[in-house]
Amino acid sequence: MERTGCVIAGGGPAGLFLGLLLARAGVQVTVLEKHADFLRDFRGDTVHPSTLTLLDELGLWSEVETLPWHPMRRMRMVFDSGEATVADFSRLRAPHPFVAMVPQWHLLNTIAEAAAREPAFRLIRNAEVLSPLMRDGRVAGVRWTDRTAGLQDDRKLWADLVVGCDGRDSVLRAGLPLREFDVPVDSWWLRLPHLPHDQDAGGTIRRSGKRLLVMLDRGDYYQMNYLIPRGADSALRQSPISTLHEQLVELHPWLADRVAGIASWDDVKLLHVKLNRLRRWSRPGLVCIGDAAHAMSPIGGIGINLAVQDAVAAARYLAGPLLAGRPRAIDRAARRVQRRRQWPTALTQGLQRFMHQQDEAVEHSELPPPMRLLGRYPWLQRGPARLLGIGVRPERAPAWARQSTTSCLTDPSNITR
């Protein structure tokens, strides 16, 4: 019977961060990742100062520095009547006062390689979690399949704790009460080339009437998020692709020499925007974090960073009980994870809901008075930068996680929180 201390479903940012931290505590942890590698087109490539600080605390900054990332230091809003910088990350009192635009597969590889250096860590790829295993009313492991072995493959992995990090369509959170929030938009994701003569555009939110386009300068291309009415994707795709070209040029005339880079609708990816959270993040033997516990809107690009904060809090509370192997203590610790991370999540989602409601109710073409103030008094830009870049309850890496167990095995008596 195959067994581990903790099994984590999903090798995304939350799953790998949690796996690394628990392994550094000496917990036997197995991460089951559905795909063969991380080479996929992610949208959550904005790594905020809070996450960069955590990577630094874990001793990984020298490795992160070598990745192909581009810093974003400012976010501005552009209306028909004018523009203003609304968030200046360079004003933050943080070790790395910028948002790093880094391809997520590079970041995940870096974390996975660091975790692989820990004796207690194991990552299994092509491993799709099918359902939880139950024993005496408690989640006691997972059923999973090796996707390379065919449909007949059915395996079991038993564990003291199962952690759902398998995204907003999590199979493990089934049965836990979920609260859904209405979102009036869906999102198109596309990219346009960055030409040699372009200046660094940072982050730009372009608003005209009810049209909204978010543009992030990735250094060698622009990543763009164009909001469309909810459920309108199929109808809009009946128009020629030149219609989208015209809309983009209307919003940013300087894009006229590159919109042909969107050759067809195949270059436009649809994201069904979801905004929800579990009312209860855990049950005996199971806890969900990240998108599995709360799907976020793409507003602010904060989903990956909230997920990482969840993972750090989870590791702090769960490491001790997992090392001791006490089921009741593990379940109490899982509930503590929700108590600590629920209100930052609810507050952030509340702000996202408010912004979506404003987008639906009001046509913005004039620069709003609050934006004028931010443009007139640059020191005010630190507030939005802190809310976006640091968050309302940032987590710090536990002291016991800042040193690899490969060089110094952790004393379990020190892991109490």
Image: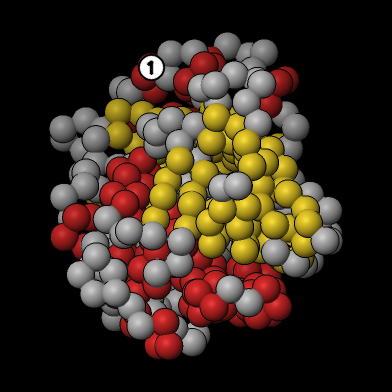
Give the left or right position of residue 369, taking residue 398 as reference: right
| 339 or 24, nearer to the observer | 24
| Residue at image coords 62%, 36% | 155
In the image, residue 80 sits, relative to residue 25, either above or below, namely above
Residue 408 in the image: state x and y as whole percent: 24, 75
In the image, residue 9 sits, relative to residue 176, either above or below, namely above
Residue 166 in the image: state x and y as whole percent: 60, 47
Residue 36 in the image: state x and y as whole percent: 43, 30
| 120 or 416, nearer to the observer | 120
Q: Can residue 291 be seen in this view?
A: no
| 248 or 386, nearer to the observer | 386
In the image, residue 269 sits, relative to residue 11, either above or below, namely above
Give the left or right position of residue 373, taking residue 219 as reference: right
| 15 or 134, nearer to the observer | 134
Give the left or right position of residue 322, taking residue 347 as reference: left
| Residue at image coords 67%, 73% | 327
Residue located beneath label 1 in the image: 260
Tag 1: amino acid: Ala
In the image, residue 249 sits, relative to residue 80, either above or below, namely above
